[in-house]
Image (cartoon, coloured by chain):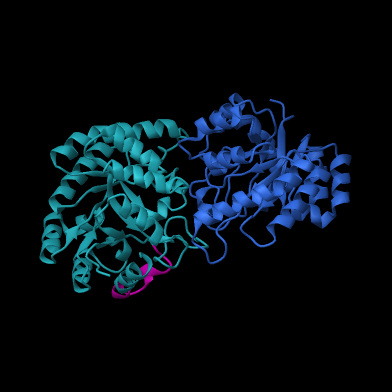
Chain colours: A cyan, B blue
Amino acid sequence: MSIDKLSINLATVREQWDLREAAEACARHGITAIDPWRDQVAKLGLSAAVRVIRDNGLRVSGYCRGGMFTSPDAIDDNRRAIDEAAALGAECLVLVCGGLPAGSRDLVEARKRIADGLGTILPHARACKMPLAIEPLHPMYAADRACVNTLAQAIDLAQALGDGVGVAVDTYHVWWDPDLEAQIARAGRMRKILAYHISDWLVPTRDILLDRGMMGDGVIDFARIGRWIEQAGYRGYTEVEIFSKRDWWTRPGDEVLRTCIERYRSTLM
Amino acid sequence: MSIDKLSINLATVREQWDLREAAEACARHGITAIDPWRDQVAKLGLSAAVRVIRDNGLRVSGYCRGGMFTSPDAIDDNRRAIDEAAALGAECLVLVCGGLPAGSRDLVEARKRIADGLGTILPHARACKMPLAIEPLHPMYAADRACVNTLAQAIDLAQALGDGVGVAVDTYHVWWDPDLEAQIARAGRMRKILAYHISDWLVPTRDILLDRGMMGDGVIDFARIGRWIEQAGYRGYTEVEIFSKRDWWTRPGDEVLRTCIERYRSTLM
């Protein structure tokens, strides 16, 4: 199985390497695309990051991340993220939309602020031809990271906003959803799937944020969900994104990349 | 505010008291209803449990729990749970439906087994006049506890099964759901709300199972969800159910009950 459509989200090796080292390692392993994070780009500097990515022949399957619309200064920060994503030639800017504002219990209002924030940054994103990918996050992050928590909800938002807005489907966040097949098909019909991320759900899960699994080590059926994604017409990258404090972040980066490639081949079909 | 409709799920004080002690303590605090767990009843013996509950003038707002339809021997075990619930005079048997079978990644099949299991035990439940309350669990429990994960999904199941099956709405499991208001209203129209449980979502959540919060200590808007429940026509008990290894399970039981009463009065309106 070819790895032409495999991308590595650089959070997966963030404890081992900086952006330059990670880009070089990906190229060395025959990986053709990455998704860098803003702090990784900032550390190297934007123009150096652009050069490193180009020199290693890499595509940028997405840029992580904008969003956080329920925090102060979100609009200016998102405009900067859009500019960076455009400079990097990213296929989309991934948006983690933000949780409840500090001290608030009002999910309805937080969700309205997210929709408003998206509407405010959209003209700039369109002007930069940078697609915005709303990523629904697992409901366990509704309080502190994103109160967009189902694919249906993300598609509704993307649909209301129109051109230039789609969704990022991440197996870790959506695998449990009884409505997943139908919603993936719906997003496909609307041509709204902008990114597909994979990592596994471990049993037990020991940390609510940093205990994601390598594909095959948990309970997610990647072959089935991958078929739904393909049947929905998505032909973009499959991006491995693993936050793993106790396991993968402690191993040598080359071992992590080798394992990503191996599991991509063995679990996705 | 009267506490006539307050019930204490005895998991809340399980580390402090056995069923007899907990029942006596509830009566002492003016609490009129409880929801005992099967292991608590088994420890005392069923007929002694019936006597203790009667002698303390308590109602049984629910019995925890049946379900686990994806495990072996689930059917016989559920029939016994129904018999016990009937002996205790419980208003419903709460069902945690079961996660993926060991070694399986097939959510579709697991969900089918749950529907089949419910259908199999339903005649016995009806014969015993014991309503079955399907409790949707938070999606973070989809793998290992219940792959019924949204209120919509639980209502769909209850609707397909017909008379004698409803849902248990637990704020901890459903608070994040963008569809919650609509689904509570739908369950109300169908007269399917059999139980209403409350506990709070803490930020941060340090343990995926045993770190639930006392109402007011987290981010859930109990006044708003409570209004939806009331507008849906539910007039039953509001049951406090808190699994809290690091906090409430370590405090004196009387302090826990006093706090439950106080927070019931201060956060629900």
Note whether A61 is above or below B33 in the view shown: below
Relative to A169, A142 lies left or right: right
Q: Quadrant of residue B63?
A: top right
Residue A77 or residue A33, whichever sits in front: A33
Q: What is the total number of numbered labels drawn onto the structure image?
A: 0
Position of the N terminus of chain B by quadrant: top right
Position of the C terminus of chain B by quadrant: top right
Note whether B238 is above or below B80 in the view shown: above
Q: Quadrant of residue A128?
A: top left
Q: Judge whether residue A163 is colored magenta.
A: no
Relative to A86, A114 lies left or right: right
Q: Is residue A172 visible?
A: yes
Residue lying at 13% horizontally and 50% vertically, measured from the top left = A87
Residue B3 or residue A160, whichever sits in front: A160
Residue A267 or residue A53, whichever sits in front: A267
Relative to A202, B68 lies left or right: right
Return the x and y of residue B92 as percentages of the image width and height. Answer: 72, 40
Q: Which residues are magenta?
A: A244-255
Return the x and y of residue A49 as percentages of the image width and height. Answer: 15, 59
Residue lying at 37% horizontally and 31% vertically, measured from the top left = A112
Return the x and y of residue A96 as percentages of the image width and height. Answer: 33, 46
